[in-house]
Image (cartoon, grey):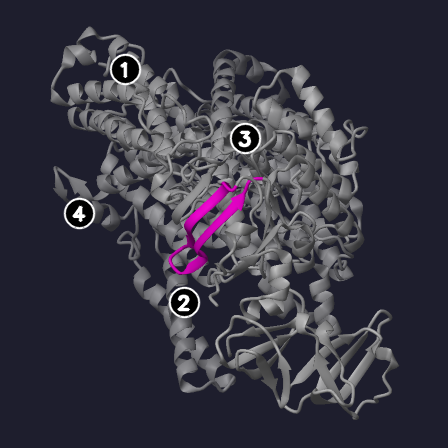
Amino acid sequence: MTARAPGARDAAPGRGTASVSLRGLVKRFGRDVVAVDDVDLDVGRGELVTLLGPSGCGKTTILRMIAGLERPTEGTIALDDEDVTRLPAYLRDVTMVFQSYALFPHMSVYENVAYGLKVARRPAEETRRRVQEALDMVGLGSLGDRSTNALSGGQQQRVALARALVIEPRVLLFDEPLSNLDAKLRRRVRDDIRELQQRLAITSVYVTHDQEEALAISDRVVVMRDGAIEQQGSPHELYARPATRFVADFIGSANFLTGRYDGSDVEVRGYRFPHAQDAAAGPVTVMVRPEAIEFAAADEPGLTATLRHGAYLGPYTEFRFDLGDQELYATISGGGLTTARPGDEVRLRFKPAGVWLLPPA
Amino acid sequence: MSATALTPVGRAGGPRFSAAWLPAAAAIAGLLALPLGRPGRAFATIDPDLYALALGGPLVWVVLLGTAATVVVGLLPLPTAQRGDALLATGGVAASSLVVWLATTGTPFGLGALAALAGLTLALGAALSESGRVQGDPFVAASILFVAAFVVLFILYPLFRVLVGAVWANGRLDLTTFAATLRHPLFFVLDNRATPVNEGALALRWAVGGAVVGLAWGLLVRARVPRLAVLTVGLAAAGLVLGVLVYGSGALVTSLAVVLIVAPVCTLLGLAFALLGQRARAAVVRRSMGVISVLPIITPPFILAFAMVFLLGRRGLFTYNVLGLSSSWVYGIPGVAIAQVLAFTPVAYLLLRGAIGSLNPALEEAAQTLGARPGTTLRTITWPLLRPALAASFLLSMIESLADFGNPVVLGGNRRYLATEVYLSLTGRFNPREAAVYGVVLLALVLLAFFLQRWWLGGGSFITVTGKPTAGALAPLPRWLEAALTALLVVWGVFVAALYASIVLGSFTQLWGVNYSLTTQHYRDFMTAGWPVFLYTLRIAAISAVPAMLLGLLVAFLIVRQSFAGRRLIEFGSLLSFATPGTVMGVAYVFAFNTGPWLMTSTAAIIVLALVFRNMPVAIRSAVAGLSQVDPSLEEASTMLRARSWTTLRRILFPLLVNVLVTGLVYAFVRAVTAISQVIFLVSPGNQLATVLLLGWVEQGQLGRAAAMGTVLIVSMLLVILLVLALARRLGSRMVEITP
């Protein structure tokens, strides 16, 4: 299993042609800093692809290179098979929603949204109609005269979205658009963006460091690390079948245990359970999701551990188990019913859906 | 799909024609319709012999054909990037051939050459952008080329010519003038033969004294041997320097002595006023600081020196009429130093006010909660944070003092000063090479100070120094300190007010010191002799202010918001034009533009250009400050909505920076009206300026008339400033918070 997972192409819906395609993209700042290191990526028509990774992984740099705000050191960028690598930003059919929204403070809501059409010298009548449509689309139809400062964060966000949508770009870029909103609003706006993107079938590239946001909004998630693509795939693929420990750890939480695989069974610390995966026999790292752990019945095979700490959280109970040289973290629904107390020895078993084998560390 | 299979076209299939073809066509039209050179100083002279076609010659044909090729290539249906590269080649060959032709033939540039250079620069900008070699649209690329050309031609080239003039003659290195000037008693002399004592020996005694003090101090604090040696040698050297400054004479000694008085005093006074302005309890004290900050801008730098003659001179109102003295103590180092302190303290104040205002009081409070006593807090927190601003204000006072020309002329007495010697050797002794040597010495001193400052600060910068004032409870000053500083401020205020009043009074007085009866004669004289010059000055200043401000904004935009090769050059050039004393720049312009292809002296153009590049750094700084308040993603958002950088500049940055721009425009205008040290080298009979004329009147003893002109200058500039402050306030109310 390699870091660059196969099957990325088949995850792209639409007509099969890539709307955005990056080939061998490299960005160096100065001599030593490599922000983006040889990235190939295709975004299908109407697809929403998220670049996910910790800060400094190069995801925003890729976004800015697609936009034309940064110039790649090497490699090519194509939009609908046209090479735009050397095309300046204002000639590309791409637009962006900024993290800070970047609403022009000296213009009203209406003027902000109309800006792109005015720059393109569209007729006044058409401008008025399209701006109104865009504002209606984001639910701000009656606020055109407002100053942008008089709006709430969520409203500002939607003005920025309307301003980007009104010029009907071929590709829409999002640079952490929700990071300035509070948690509750973030979920709302996230769903709104996804719904709008689906309705307009607009090709989008979305940058975030929030894995939950990435899973919720994307057709396909591209996990990045140190300027390179670690793995890409549908949200479910990434969660259930991470290619590397980094991906497993970054998306959701995970326990990592050393074990052996013989092609049909996995053995971890004397606990043997069946597992079907196209992986080489021999030593492996076993990833176990916290929700895949449950208490084993007395006659079942299981993993022996010491209960160290339990916290009842309503829908599930959070446990920390001691395996001697490492800890196991588990969220067990209905776990509150256990009679085990801290210090007691317990036996645990793994649900097959939450186990995945990784190359040994 | 491989990278090579992609066709290099944009959304619209790439522009059909290059944006370079139109300016290149304008260049060729200029080359054909206007003469390449001119016979004399007048720009508009049409000499049929100096047309490109009449001149002929291989270089001229290369220019013509290269420009024509640029037009043709610009219209060819080639891939954009390749076409850009081709245009770079044709346009580059044409432009460089034209420059080489001008340089080798020495023909003053004509309107045709000007049109061709401008057109080709625009075309090359478009080519650079289209070839993808510069990230940015044709506007940005052409702006970079223009700004770089301006920096080279109007800042680096003149300074280079001065340097060459000092050490180069008849085609080879020639240090005779250099050595002769430095050895001349006017420059520096320690042992004056005319006096019976040996000044050198006297100065040496100071060195010995310093060594003794150092040794004694070292022994007293029981320093170890290395430290003892450092103390002894250091204080001996300091003693020697002081001794030389006290006993020596010549321009170097005098100027250094003045600098060493003025820079620390200005910095300390500036600090005192900044402390009062930010932390005084009485609002009236804080508010009176506004007046202090406006004074240096509206007053030509030597007006106060001139007023000191009225008050403190041989027949001064105070010294003669009140005290009954008839002493000329005010002429010489004390007078010049006082006049400079009066003139430059407000500059130091402005610098330090920002630093004090942005000191975060929480830092001092944090230190105190960690157990630091007030003294410790001052030493470990406040002082390190203020140090960069103090160093900057020290340096700025130094540069201003070294460059100052007017005050030594008025109050210099029989001593020599570096800045005036530059002028006197050029216009009095008709020795341009000696002037160049003095210029190089001045420049070297300023650059030395500059590097010392860099070294002292160790390149460390502190965010809080440049940041906005932080909200928070500023600790008020200790009462005794506030009282002392307020007393200082009152003395200062009374003195300055008396000086200004004496100018106004002097303009209505028959003959100051002799006959105090009132008259309007001086204003009638001013109307005939000075009014036209005054109006001309206003016109020149207004003409120079607009390009200074626009260029400042453009340079700031390029430096702050764009990245390109050569950005360092532009930064360096603007820094250099800021640090170079005006007198040096003035003589440099004489060297660069008196003959040869760039002949421009004795024209209004050269004065305008000098003022533009003198005031550009100020405009750059205010534009940079303004730009740093604007979130860069606003401009990126505009670009993402398909606006080109010119549109972004016009529709986003202009409206957001209107406040800064208007203020910058007016400061450029007022500074142009009150400038002297640079333009005095460049005025000519038809192009007289108010400050130069005023200084001439003072020198000739036409004090009443000079006072009348001074009054008119001060009052009119005050009106302009007040008007603009009111306007800026109104514009300001329209401004909204810029950063989201």
Closer to the chain start, of discs 1 and 2, is 1
Q: Are dots 1 and 2 on a single chain?
A: yes
Pointer 4: residues within 10 angstroms few (<14), some, or many (20+)?
A: some
Q: Residue B509 occupies which quadrant of the picture?
A: top right
Provide the residue designation for mark 1.
B28
Residue A255 vertical position relative to residue B248 in the rendered view, above or below: below
Please tell me which of labels 4 and 3 falls first in the chain: 4
Amino acid type for the residue under numbered disc 1: Ile
Mark 4–mark 2 Cα distance, whole angstroms, equals 32 Å
Residue ID for mark 3? B642
Instruction: State the separation of the CA atoms marked 2 and 3.
Output: 67 Å
Badge 4 and badge 3 in a common chain: yes
Q: Residue A167 location, x and y as percent?
A: 61, 29
Write the residue at 26% across / 30% down: B86
Q: Amino acid at mark 3?
A: Arg
Q: Earlier in the sequence, mark 4 or mark 2?
A: 4
Left or right relative to A357: residue B284: right
Q: Which residue is mark 4?
A: B175
